[in-house]
Amino acid sequence: MSHHAPARRFRCYTWRAFERRDGCHIEAEIECGGAAPCCPGCGAILEARSTTRFARSLPLDANGYDLDCRGCRRFWCVVRHTSRSIRLLRMRRLAAAVRAVRYSRADAERPFAGEQRRIAAVA
């Protein structure tokens, strides 16, 4: 007679973000301004959390909160930007674009500079 342990159900304890499609559905419900937004997966009412899990990555002056579904253990981050936070985001993107162009031009002007350095180091 073999004894098998009863099948255990492991519950997921990590929170995951909703897919973009589901997030757009949630955002549309918020924009309508009707009843509280519901979870696209299970239909439960989403609970607002006063802070967001992405607080560290928000730009200065932007406010954010999470809408949580406890049943699915999923959340959607809602970010409200100010004019200053949008300006800071644009400045970051501009700086990143300038850096990318500067490095690509330097590589184009000297395509074999890296190989010459490696050959000199070996010799």
Image (cartoon, rainbow, N blue to C red):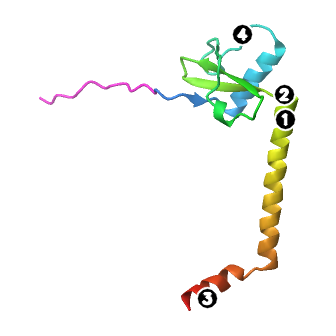
Is residue 116 depicted above or below 66 in this figure?
below
Q: Which residue is mark 3?
A: 120
Along the line of sight, the residue nearer the viewer: 11 or 116: 116
Q: Residue at x 73, y 21 (%)?
A: 26
As helix, strand or loop, the secondary structure at mark 1 comes to helix
- Outermost residue toward the top in this view: 35
Looking at the image, is mark 4 or mark 1 nearer the viewer? 1
In the displayed structure, would residue 17 be above or below residue 93?
Answer: above
Q: Residues within 10 Å of mark 1 (few under 14, many from 20)?
A: some
* Residue linked to disc 1: 86
Mark 4 or mark 1: which comes first in sequence? 4
Residue 59, position in %: x, y?
75, 35
Decide whether residue 123 is among the magenta residues. no
Task: Check disc 4 and give the amino acid type.
Answer: Ala
Disc ID at residue 60: none
70 lies left or right of 36: left
Assess whether mark 2 and mark 1 are in contact (beta carbons under 8 angstroms). Answer: yes
Q: Nearer the viewer, mark 4 or mark 3?
A: 3
Name the image quarter holding residue 86.
top right
Q: CA distance from mark 2 to mark 4?
A: 24 Å
- Who's the residue at 77% across and 28% down the image? 62
Q: Which residues are magenta?
A: 1-12
Q: CA distance from mark 2 to mark 3?
A: 52 Å
Residue 1, how many percent across, how many down? 11, 29
Sequence order check: which comes first, mark 1 or mark 3? 1
Q: Place residue 3 in its image quadrant.
A: top left
Which of disc 3 and disc 4 is earlier in sequence? Answer: 4
* Sooner in the amino-acid sequence: mark 2 or mark 4: 4
Q: On the image, numbered disc 4 is attached to which residue? A: 36
Read off the residue under disc 2: 82
